[in-house]
Image (spheres, grey):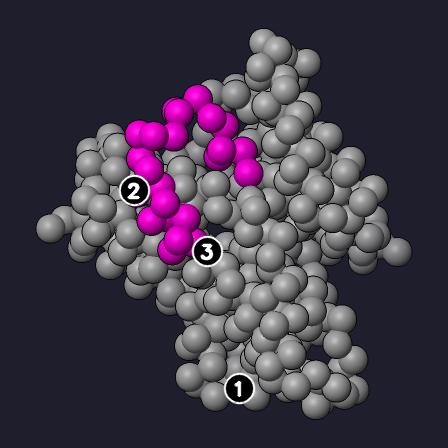
């Protein structure tokens, strides 16, 4: 059985390979934020206050375009709506935890920590409550590893700034990270159908304002997954 | 001052979103259909982010060999399924993209 410490470090280790993709993305965010006219302090603070990469990216672009404050806030909220789905997916595993644990896990609930954490929870034997009880330590390890990397990479982007050539396609590490995260979960036809239909819907709905296409496409994918599974 | 207020409001809404169901579903039984549904959250959300990054260039469909992000992304998909390694997936995808962009 895992002790608290070993569960924590196992979570850190599971997150490590993803950090290769997260670090360049955080740097790009730092550079973009300065270009958008944010002060270094504000650029850095957004990484811990909002702590959601793609929404910070979009927010920096909107600051640059001098969009109204309400539009930027709304866009951040919509881009991050998918986290409600993550919250629901994680909820069955956090029910017995204290409010403090729930508050902490919600803060650390990013794409990368979520997928690593949920794969771990689902691999645990549900008939062994003592193994389940260490799940939050695993999630904490994964989440903190990601959090520290995100803060460090933002700082690196803020400090290096213009020293990084603009034509370097570092932003491509985000879709690559997500490809690495999605592949292990595509084990059966319903899951594959959910992925492909969500992807196609995202292409069709891309031009919708405030990135609403993302959440719409996710709902299409989930529905198709359910339908394909239901027919078997 | 405005950027700070914007990120504070955006941050609070994001946190509320992340906390939402962890708190709500902590108080009631989770129906079976919802548990079945939630399995599809990761593939659906992640694919909805990945597809536009690969298939669109400046907002338009770019289904050609000249779209180096599409080729690099497909190479990464192959590696992800074949090797099941996060590290290799990111490295190969980035290497293919850099090579294609250098050649162009």
| Mark 3 vs 1: CB contact within 8 A | no
Q: Nearer the viewer, mark 3 or mark 1?
A: 3
Figure quadrant of residue A126:
bottom right
Q: Looking at the picture, does residue A83 appear above or below residue A163?
A: below
Q: Are marks 3 and 2 in contact (CB under 8 Å)?
A: no
Q: Is residue B22 above or below residue A114?
A: below
Is disc 3 surrounded by few (<14), some (14 to 19) or many (20+) residues within 10 Å?
Answer: some
Give the residue pinned by disc 2: A159
- A21 or B17: which is nearer to us? A21
Q: Which of the two labelled residues, at mark 3 and mark 2, occupies the earlier sequence position?
A: 3
Q: Mark 2 or mark 1: which is in front? A: 2
Q: Earlier in the sequence, mark 3 or mark 1?
A: 1
* Left or right of B36 on screen, residue A172: left
Q: Is residue A172 above or below residue A139?
A: above
Rendering coords of residue A96 (x, y %): 57, 88
Identify the magenta region. Answer: A149-173
CA–CA distance in space, label 2 to label 1:
39 Å
Query: Mark 2 or mark 1: which comes first in sequence?
Result: 1
Quadrant assignment, res A202: top right
The circle drawn on residue A97 is 1
Q: Chain of mark 3?
A: A
Name the quadrant of the N terminus of chain A.
bottom right
Q: Chain of mark 1?
A: A
Q: What numbered label is drawn on residue B92?
A: none
Using the rendered image of the protein, determine whether residue B26 is visible from the camera's viewpoint.
yes
Chain under disc 2:
A
Residue A166, magenta (yes or no): yes
What residue is pinned by disc 3? A149
């Amino acid at each position: 059985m895992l002790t608290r410490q070993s569960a924590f470090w196992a979570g850190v280790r599971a997150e490590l390979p993803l950090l290769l993709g997260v670090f360049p993305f955080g740097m790009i965010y730092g550079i973009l934020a300065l270009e958008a006219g944010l002060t270094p302090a504000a650029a850095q603070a957004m990484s811990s206050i909002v702590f959601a990469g793609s929404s910070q990216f979009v927010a920096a672009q909107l600051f640059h375009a001098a969009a109204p404050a309400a539009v930027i806030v709304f866009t951040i909220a919509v881009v991050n709506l998918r986290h409600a789905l993550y919250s629901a997916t994680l909820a069955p595993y956090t029910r017995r935890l204290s409010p403090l644990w729930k508050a902490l896990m919600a803060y650390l609930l990013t794409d990368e920590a979520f997928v690593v954490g949920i794969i771990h929870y689902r691999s645990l034997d549900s008939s062994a409550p003592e193994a389940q009880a260490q799940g939050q330590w695993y999630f904490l390890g994964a989440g903190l590893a990601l959090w520290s990397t995100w803060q460090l990479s933002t700082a690196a982007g803020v400090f290096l700034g213009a020293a990084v050539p603009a034509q370097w396609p570092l932003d491509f590490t985000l879709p690559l990270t997500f490809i690495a995260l999605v592949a292990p979960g595509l084990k059966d036809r319903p899951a594959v159908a959910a992925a492909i239909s969500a992807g196609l819907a995202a292409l069709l709905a891309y031009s919708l304002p405030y990135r609403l296409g993302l959440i719409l496409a996710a709902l299409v994918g989930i529905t198709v997954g359910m339908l394909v599974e239901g027919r078997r | 001052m405005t950027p700070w207020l914007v990120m504070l409001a955006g941050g609070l809404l994001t946190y509320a979103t992340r906390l939402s169901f962890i708190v709500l579903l902590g108080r009631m039984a989770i129906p079976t259909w919802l548990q079945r549904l939630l399995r599809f959250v990761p593939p659906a959300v992640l694919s909805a982010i990945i597809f536009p990054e690969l298939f669109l260039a400046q907002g338009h469909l770019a289904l050609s060999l000249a779209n180096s992000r599409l080729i690099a992304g497909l190479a990464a998909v192959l590696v992800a399924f074949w090797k099941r390694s996060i590290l290799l997936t990111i490295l190969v995808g980035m290497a293919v993209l850099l090579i294609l962009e250098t050649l162009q």
